[in-house]
Image (cartoon, helix red, strand yellow):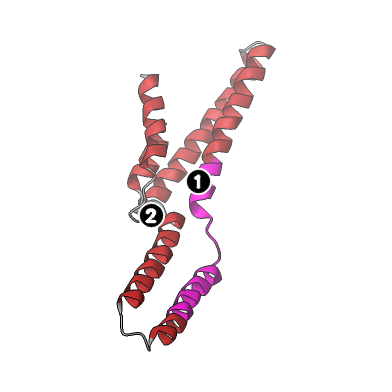
Amino acid sequence: MDSRLEVYRKLPDIEAAKTELSRSAAMQSEIWSEAVAASRAIFPQPAAMLLLPALNQMIDITTTRTMAGQNHPPSIIFIMLIFLALLSALLAGYGMACSSSRIHMLVFAAILSITVYVIFDLEYPRLGLIQIDAADQVLVEVRQGMK
């Protein structure tokens, strides 16, 4: 648990987080090996049937969480989003060129810029204004409960 929390604390330093993530994966592998060996040698069969699936779920959720942080849409999606924003701004500017009021252009540009920023920020939630620290807080509380 401590190793997993360290991974999230070290973000957005990707290299430090990857180092800690590999350390965490090695610990998981060691825990799994020892649990399998102990379930064969020490535990009665019903205890092993409870321990190993729970341990497997723990490893699965850490893998799922890691992959969710690493998987992003292809770059072409972001390029198309930026192109769409620029094209929309061009067409709106052309349509509003005859207008004497410039407030519409400013509002449109602001809304378009904020929308594109929020989309990028949601895709990389540990780097921008939108943070997912609440998800990490659950792990901190679980760790405190273990002490």
Q: Nearer the viewer, residue 62 or 23?
A: 62
Q: Residue at x 37, y 89 (%)?
A: 98
Q: In which quadrant is the C terminus drawn?
A: top left
23 w.r.t. 104: above or below: above
Question: Which residue is under mark 1?
Answer: 66
Judge by depth and name the residue closer to the eye, 79 or 70. Answer: 79
Please name the amino acid that badge 2 sits on.
Glu
Q: Is residue 22 highlighted in magenta?
A: no
Residue segment shown in magenta: 63-89
**Can residue 36 be spotted in the picture?**
no
> Residue 14: x and y, percent?
39, 54
- Mark 2 and mark 1: span between their CA atoms? 14 Å
| Residue at image location 41% in from the left, 31% down from the top | 138
The vertical placement of 43 against 80, above or below, is above
Residue at the image position 36 percent from the left and 51 percent from the top: 130
State whether residue 41 appears in this view. Answer: yes
Tell me which corner region of the image, top left, top right, bottom left or bottom right, holds residue 5.
top left
- Quadrant where the N terminus sits is top left
- Residue 40 circle label: none
Amino acid type, residue under disc 1 in the picture: Thr
Q: Which quadrant of the structure image shows residue 121?
A: bottom left
**Residue beneath disc 2:** 15
Residue situated furthest right in the rendering: 45
